[in-house]
Amino acid sequence: MNTIALLVDGLRVDVPEGATVAAAVARSGHAFRRSSGGEPRAPLCGMGACFECRVSIDHVAHLRACMVLARPGMRVETQQ
């Protein structure tokens, strides 16, 4: 199995080729974002309908991590 490396909040994360950004964030141990009350949020649907997995990827905000395939060198920022 081939793996690729990307950065999640500055932390190197290795995932299998074909994995989503959501899988990389989950492997990093970071929350995707926080609710207005400060609670950690995570993907609920896994198919892009709930928008709970929003992250910034290479400085593009509000992308759904469950809908984007991870690429080598990608820089992902959560709302930790």
Image (tube, rainbow, N blue to C red):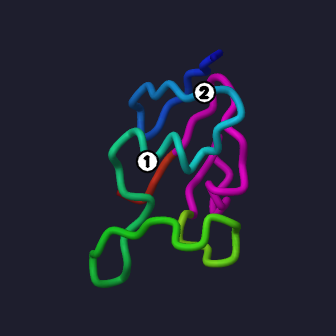
Q: What residue type is labelled 1?
A: Ala
Name the residue furthest bottom: 37
Q: Which residue is labeled 1 in the image?
A: 26
Element at label 1 = helix
Q: In this view, does 39 lie above or below 24?
A: below
Give whichever of 39, 61 is nearer the camera. Answer: 39
Left or right: residue 25 versus residue 51 is left
Residue at 35%, 49% (x, y): give it: 30
Name the residue furthest top: 2
Label ID, residue 49: none
On the image, which quarter does residue 2 sit in?
top right
On the image, which quarter does residue 3 sit in?
top right
Element at label 2 = strand
Give whichever of 58, 42 is nearer the camera. Answer: 42
Residue at 57%, 63% (x, y): give it: 54
Residue at 62%, 64% (x, y): give it: 46
Residue 72 among magenta residues = yes
Total numbered labels: 2
- The x, y position of residue 20, in whole percent, is 64, 44
Quarter of the image where the N terminus is located: top right
| Magenta-colored span | 54-76
Label ID, residue 16: 2
Residue 18 among magenta residues = no
Left or right: residue 29 versus residue 22 is left
- The x, y position of residue 29, in whole percent, is 33, 45
Residue at 46%, 53% (x, y): give it: 78
Please tell me how crowded label 1 is: few (under 14), some (14-19), or many (20+) other residues with Cα within 10 Å: some
Earlier-in-chain disc, 1 versus 2: 2
